Image: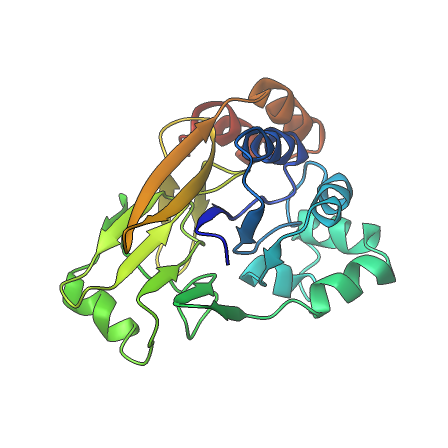
């Protein structure tokens, strides 16, 4: 494996943001891309997002929202989920089905949430005000069966770099396509990155140490917000414009 990698996650069907991020990665001459999941689910452009992803060579894993696209929809009030499932063809579904829940590459573990759950937050503890950083002991407990020294995770949409007392490094690249959101589980909470920029991470190995850059890429978030509004998802429109939920 080359020692410079780009880590992306939580695109959520935002093809405008994805194009900007992939162009930035290309401009930097980075060939190794790891995608931590939640790629297509969202009210913007899931099919365009899929076309972009398959054009580029990268390692993909499955997120919880990818998995939801394969499951039966019991509650048709989940209009975005139902709408996207109607759009997806067998080609799209077959691509999602082959995505692994986690991948090990050299000394790096890729997972979406935690190594054991695509719905749990590895680094954050939920409060009504948002996600606060868990203690090192809590994080290490979630990683007690992980042999790798570098863990890449997504799901929270909040860029973080956490160095643990046992020497392990945990990196969350943030979200390419949705910089803030509200959720009801495990308790009602909101996650906010604070800006509308598309987030991803560059990691470069130098003398057995990782040089890590959290990258914020500008793109036409006003256009993305308008598309969300047109598709009856005003709850996405504000976060796309501001990074606030």
Question: Count of labels shown?
Answer: 0
Which residue is situated farthest in the front direction here? 207
State whether residue 86 is above or below residue 137.
Answer: above
Residue 14 lies, in percent from the top left, at 63, 37
Residue 216 lies, in percent from the top left, at 43, 29
Say if residue 95 shows up in the picture.
yes
**Which one is in front, 58 or 115?**
58
Say if residue 70 shows up in the picture.
no
Query: Residue at left 53%, top 53%?
Result: 34
**Which one is in front, 171 or 76?**
171
State whether residue 69 is above or below residue 235.
Answer: below
Q: Is residue 143 left or right of residue 109?
A: left
Which residue is situated farthest in the right direction here? 90
Q: Quadrant of the C terminus?
A: top left
**Which one is in front, 40 or 161?**
161
Q: Quadrant of residue 164?
A: bottom left
Residue 127 lies, in percent from the top left, at 26, 52
**Which one is in front, 130 or 197?**
197
Query: Residue at left 65%, top 32%?
Result: 19
Q: Which colour style is shown?
A: rainbow
Query: Residue at left 35%, top 37%?
Result: 213
Residue 114 lies, in percent from the top left, at 39, 67
Query: Residue at left 82%, top 50%?
Result: 87
Which residue is situated farthest in the bottom direction here? 145
Q: Is residue 12 left or right of residue 198?
A: right
């Amino acid at each position: 494996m080359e020692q410079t990698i780009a880590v992306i996650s939580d695109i959520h069907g935002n093809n405008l943001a994805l194009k900007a991020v992939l162009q930035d990665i290309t401009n930097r001459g980075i060939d190794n891309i790891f995608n931590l999941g939640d790629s297509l689910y969202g009210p913007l452009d899931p099919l365009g997002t899929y076309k972009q992803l398959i054009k580029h060579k990268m390692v993909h894993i499955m997120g919880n929202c990818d998995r939801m696209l394969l499951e039966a929809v019991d509650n048709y009030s989940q209009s975005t989920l139902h709408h996207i499932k109607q759009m997806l063809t067998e080609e799209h579904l077959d691509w999602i089905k082959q995505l692994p829940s986690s991948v090990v590459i050299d000394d790096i573990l890729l997972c979406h949430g935690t190594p054991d759950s695509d719905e749990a937050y590895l680094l954050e503890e939920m409060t009504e005000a948002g996600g606060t950083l868990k203690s090192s002991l809590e994080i290490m407990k979630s990683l007690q069966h992980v042999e790798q020294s570098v863990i890449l995770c997504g799901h929270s949409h909040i860029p973080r770099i956490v160095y643990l007392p046992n020497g392990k490094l945990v990196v969350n690249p943030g979200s390419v396509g949705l910089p803030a959101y509200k959720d009801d589980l495990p308790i009602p909470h909101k996650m906010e990155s604070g800006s509308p920029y598309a987030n991803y991470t560059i990691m470069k190995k130098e003398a057995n140490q990782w040089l890590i850059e959290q990258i914020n890429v500008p793109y036409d978030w006003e256009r993305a917000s308008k598309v969300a509004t047109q598709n009856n998802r005003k709850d996405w429109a504000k976060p796309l414009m501001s990074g606030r939920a």
